[in-house]
Amino acid sequence: MSTTYDFPEIRLFHPCRQRRDKWQALKILEETSELVETAKQSLKSNGGERTQWQDMLAYDVCDLLQTLANFCDAYQISPNHLALAMHRLDRVSEDRGMFGPGERTRMHR
């Protein structure tokens, strides 16, 4: 199993379609909610067609990733900012033991 995940390249919307406002931030909640709902439906499907659910989940993940990328662009969060923040987050997760084997707790599920 890989220790990192490479996301595909994400195209940004035209700048006229983005604003540094609460609606840009709320769009993240909307797309996240759609992803959670699809995940819940896939769990309730009692197996269902696995590839169909994977396709639907992948689409919702990409929709969320595009929304996050547009948010970063609108709020002027550079890839360098993200890399630095990810490095800090990795240290916190490492201190919690999240990269090694262990029991999954309620806090980490």
Image (tube, rainbow, N blue to C red):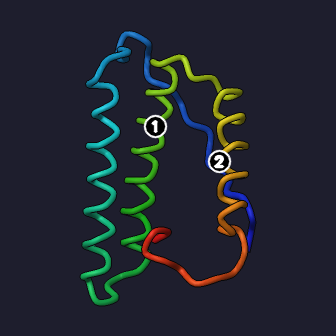
Residue 69 x/y as whole percent: 50, 32
Residue drawn at x 44%, y 27% as measured from the top left = 71
Q: Quadrant of residue 19?
A: top left
Residue 92 x/y as whole percent: 66, 53
Residue drawn at x 28%, y 89% as measured from the top left = 46
Residue drawn at x 63%, y 23% as measured from the top left = 78
Most foreground residue, 64 or 21:
21
Residue with the mark numbered 2:
89
Mark 2 or mark 1: which comes first in sequence?
1
Instruction: Relative to 48, say whether 62 is above or below.
Output: above
Packing grade of label 1 (10 A; few <14, some 14-19, many >=20) is some
Instruction: Name the kind of residue labelled 2 in the image.
Output: Leu
Q: Is residue 63 left or right of residue 40?
A: right
Residue 87 x/y as whole percent: 73, 43
**Disc 2, SS:** helix
Instruction: Relative to 85, say whether 44 is above or below.
Output: below
Residue 41 x/y as whole percent: 25, 73
Residue with the mark numbered 1:
66
Of all residues, the one furthest to the top in this rendering is 16
Packing grade of label 2 (10 A; few <14, some 14-19, many >=20) is few
Q: Quadrant of residue 93?
A: bottom right
**Disc 1, SS:** helix
Q: Is residue 62 left or right of residue 10?
A: left
Instruction: Relative to 45, say whether 81 is above or below.
Output: above
Q: Is residue 86 left or right of residue 20?
A: right
Task: Report the Cα–Cα distance between label 2 and label 1.
Answer: 21 Å
**Quadrant including the N terminus:** bottom right
Residue drawn at x 56%, y 36% as measured from the top left = 10
**Quadrant including the C terminus:** bottom left
Instruction: Name the kind of residue labelled 1 in the image.
Output: Gln
Most foreground residue, 17 or 88:
88
Most foreground residue, 15 or 27:
27
